[in-house]
Image (spheres, helix red, strand yellow):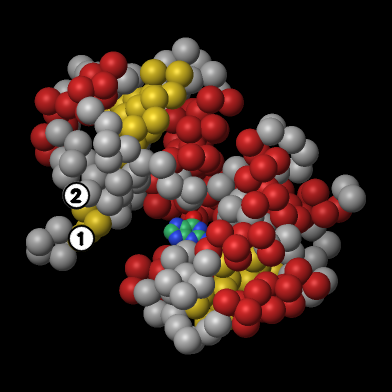
Amino acid sequence: MKILDGKALANKKAILIKEELKKLSFTPKLVIVLVGDDFASLKYVGHKLKKAEALGINAELVHLPKSTTQDELIKQIQKLNNDKSVHGYIVQLPVPKHIDDKLIQEYVDPSKDVDGLSTMNAGRFFQSGYNYIVPGTPSGIVQILKDNDIPLKGKVVAMIGRSNIVGKPLSLALLNENATVIMCHSRTDFKILKQADIVISATGVPHLIKANMIKENATIIDVGINRDKNNKLTGDVDFEDVKDKAYAVTPVPGGVGPMTIICIFQNLLKLIKFQQNK
Ligand code: GUN
């Protein structure tokens, strides 16, 4: 079985990003807005800031208390929209429950939307419109598949999970690559997975995907970042179980995660190009 090494690919992409950065006459500025102290978010934000520093991007964290109101967060977003020194920003999700995350996305300026989750960017992506970007995790997964010469055209992909961050945009990105996408979720009869050449799991259920659920030589993309009983990082896929049946699998850690992070910076560069061509 082949290991789809997202970390190695992210390192290759980092070299290209550094080359692109050298062509700019300024250092791009990325702002990450984090509301509250969600444990996983603190970790992801730490990784993003560290990567920005390694690439030579000026990244700033705006860390707001959990008690921040929706109006205060909207004001913070409007401030970033109006700040000419800021090229892109991220509102780290999840936001605390008293804040409506869908309303927040109405305020994110698509020209600074590194995550691609704003209402306007999502609409442009849906319509294959102008100056849109593909959200990080979907973009990273398509790049992993392409870099490993795993064909998508006409192939059946089972996408498990229908979140706004992964499942929905990834199904669209795969459709754009001419894959036949089956959208699966908690109410799906998983017998359908046997038809899939590629199974992508973004459920948050540790070890959900077993060998007896997949087709021989299927490729499996594991988007899960879970903790098992021993607090060990584990994906949605039972790696040991599937390893003799699958053609290829992304490991956790070292698979999708590093590519999700590198895509933030690819997207930032893309936004800068859009901003310059205005
Ligand atoms: N939380 C988990 N993944 C993501 C992501 O890709 N973007 C943001 N903003 N928050 C996240």
At label 1, which amino acid type do we have? Arg
Q: Which of 150/182 is in front?
A: 182
User: How would you rate the neighbour count of disc 1 (Cα within 10 Å): few for under 14, some for 14-19, many for 20 or more?
Assistant: some
Q: Residue 218's x, y, as percent? A: 28, 22
Q: Is residue 199 left or right of residue 119?
A: left
Label 2 element class = loop
Q: Residue 185's x, y, as percent? A: 32, 38
**For residue 249, what is the image quadrant?**
top left
Q: Is residue 249 left or right of residue 42?
A: left
**Distance CA(mark 2)–CA(mark 1):** 8 Å
Sequence order check, earlier mark of 2 and 1: 2
In the displayed structure, would residue 40 be above or below residue 171? below
Q: Is residue 208 left or right of residue 17?
A: left
Q: Residue at x 74, y 35 (%)?
A: 129
Residue 70, visible in the rendered structure:
yes
Q: Which of 162/258 is in front?
A: 162
Total labels: the figure holds: 2
Q: Are marks 2 and 1 in contact (CB under 8 Å)?
A: yes
Q: Is mark 2 within 8 Å of ligand 1?
A: no
Q: Residue at x 27, y 36 (%)?
A: 187
Q: Which residue is mark 1?
A: 227
User: How would you rate the neighbour count of disc 2 (Cα within 10 Å): few for under 14, some for 14-19, many for 20 or more?
Assistant: some
Q: Residue 190's x, y, as percent? A: 22, 28
At label 2, which amino acid type do we have? Pro
Q: Which residue is mark 2?
A: 206
